[in-house]
Image (cartoon, grey):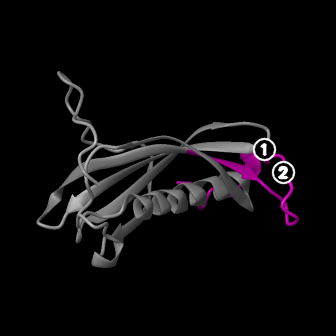
Amino acid sequence: MADARPEEPGTEPRSEPRGTLVLRTRAMPADTNPSGDIFGGWLLAQMDIASGMLAEWRADGRIATVAVQEMVFHRPVRVGDVVCCYAEVLRTGTTSVAVLVEAWVLRRRDQTRRVKVTEGVFTFVAIDDAGRKRPLPPLDSIPHNGGG
């Protein structure tokens, strides 16, 4: 992934992620595109996994991804980078959960500074064992050991 968009003029990039650290993994050579950067589809999959874990906790059961919105690729991910996905529930509906995911990296040669590389909003619907939509349970009925 090439640098798709520079930081907005006159603004400082945020140095802290939003949400809870949900997933951490290392980008490997098998995950590269023909240019040698990490393939955007691989990163999208990591973000779907991370946001899905948070949505599954909030739904207290099975969920399905129904939409990915507002994907923005800020910086490339390189082989050897540690990719850290932070997730936060943005909103819930009767059956749905929208989760903001930010992907930050620790560069292989500089593990002291996080760099935001990608963000997006993933929407999930709670489903039953037959794959039909089901209502989300009340928040106070969910065990608090998996949602951050």
Q: Residue at x 17, y 67 (%)?
A: 108
Q: Quadrant of residue 131?
A: bottom right
> What amino acid is at disc 1?
Thr
Q: Residue at x 60, y 61 (%)?
A: 145
Camera-side residue of 112 and 100:
100
> What amino acid is at disc 2?
Lys
Residue 88 lies, in percent from the top left, at 51, 45
Mark 1 and mark 2 lie on one chain; the one further toward the N terminus is: 1
Residue 60 lies, in percent from the top left, at 73, 57
Whether tag 1 and tag 2 are in contact, CB under 8 A, the answer is: yes
The label shown at residue 95 is 1
Residue 106 lies, in percent from the top left, at 23, 60
Q: CA distance from mark 1 to mark 2?
A: 7 Å
Residue 71 lies in the magenta-colored region: no
The label shown at residue 78 is none
Quarter occupied by the N terminus: bottom left
Left or right: where does residue 41 sit relative to residue 147?
left
Residue 126 lies in the magenta-colored region: yes
As drawn, which residue projects farthest toward the left? Answer: 109
User: Is label 1 in a helix, a strand or a loop?
Assistant: loop
Q: Residue at x 27, y 59 (%)?
A: 77
Mark 2 neighbour class, 10 Å CA radius: few under 14, some 14 to 19, many 20 or more: some
User: Is label 2 in a helix, a strand or a loop?
Assistant: loop
Q: Quadrant of residue 112?
A: bottom left
Mark 1 neighbour class, 10 Å CA radius: few under 14, some 14 to 19, many 20 or more: some
Left or right: where does residue 98 sit relative to residue 34?
right
Q: Residue at x 22, y 33 (%)?
A: 7
Camera-side residue of 148 and 46:
46
Residue segment shown in magenta: 122-148
As drawn, which residue projects farthest toward the front? Answer: 34
Dominant secondary structure, magenta: loop
The label shown at residue 133 is 2
